[in-house]
Image (tube, grey):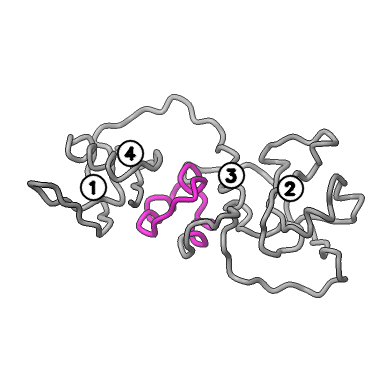
Amino acid sequence: MPHVLVLNASYEPLGVVSTRRALILVLNHKAVSLEDSGITLHSATDTLTAPSVVRLTRFVRVPFRGPVPLTRRALFARDHGRCVYCGAAATSVDHVIPRSRGGQHRWDNVVAACRRCNHTKADRHLTELGWRMKRPPAPPIGLAWRVIGTGIKDPRWRPYLEPYGGLEQFREYEHHDHLDHAGALPVPAVRTHPHRRGEPEPLSA
């Protein structure tokens, strides 16, 4: 069963709920459907069209919005499912400063990496290998990341998420199927430059 994007009365994205929960909100007049999913549900006495996007009828004040949770899905979405070191398809998570050397599990120290680069880097610093990243890792910004980070997607959601950050990631992730069992986002092939066998190509700053 598909999930449903829930918007505040002000159209800000609040999160994702099950279709059942969204229907209850609509039937109780606590939300209105903005987009249909195209799925029809039947009961003993009625037929309902399942929504894809609903908007609350009353504004819900969110007192505090903490940082975007650091999950594997959100990390791979931020890094486009690509190894930040060589550009190959990412299959693992790497700590830029290894945890064994004081690195923390935070957005600014965690990146997506391919298995080869992760194994080659091991517990060494980038300077020891002569590697560089195009840009330093940073926490994703924008309310849309509350949705993008879940890995759940629906192209109907895009117009409602665009104004709230993460547009570049959403353009990419809306065209692909759900994450595979490894958690990596499938992405189009990218052009890579030749480099010495067994060593990832250092990227320019």
Does the magenta portion include 156? Answer: yes
**Which numbered disc, 2 or 1, marks the residue that appears first in the sequence?**
1
Numbered label attached to residue 140? 3
Is residue 182 depicted above or below 125 in this figure? below
Q: Callout 1, which amino acid?
A: Ser
Q: Magenta part of the protein: which range?
A: 145-173
Numbered label attached to residue 94? 2
**In the drawing, does residue 55 fall left or right of residue 101?**
left
Looking at the image, do the residues carrying marks 3 and 1 touch, with CB atoms under 8 Å apart?
A: no
Tag 3's secondary structure? loop
For the point 70% across and 58% down, the residue is: 83
- Residue position for label 1: 33
- Residue position for label 4: 10
Quarter-of-image position of residue 19 = top left
Cα gap from disc 3 to disc 1, whole angstroms: 29 Å
For the point 35% across and 48% down, the residue is: 3
Cα gap from disc 3 to disc 2, whole angstroms: 17 Å
For the point 49% across and 46% down, the residue is: 150
Looking at the image, do the residues carrying marks 2 and 1 touch, with CB atoms under 8 Å apart?
A: no
Residue 202 appears at what percent x and percent y?
83, 62
For the point 78% across and 53% down, the residue is: 118
**In the drawing, does residue 67 fall left or right of residue 159?**
right
Does the magenta portion include 98? Answer: no
Cα gap from disc 2 to disc 4, whole angstroms: 38 Å
Q: Callout 3, which amino acid?
A: Pro
Instruction: Nearest to the eye among marks 3 and 4: give it.
Output: 3
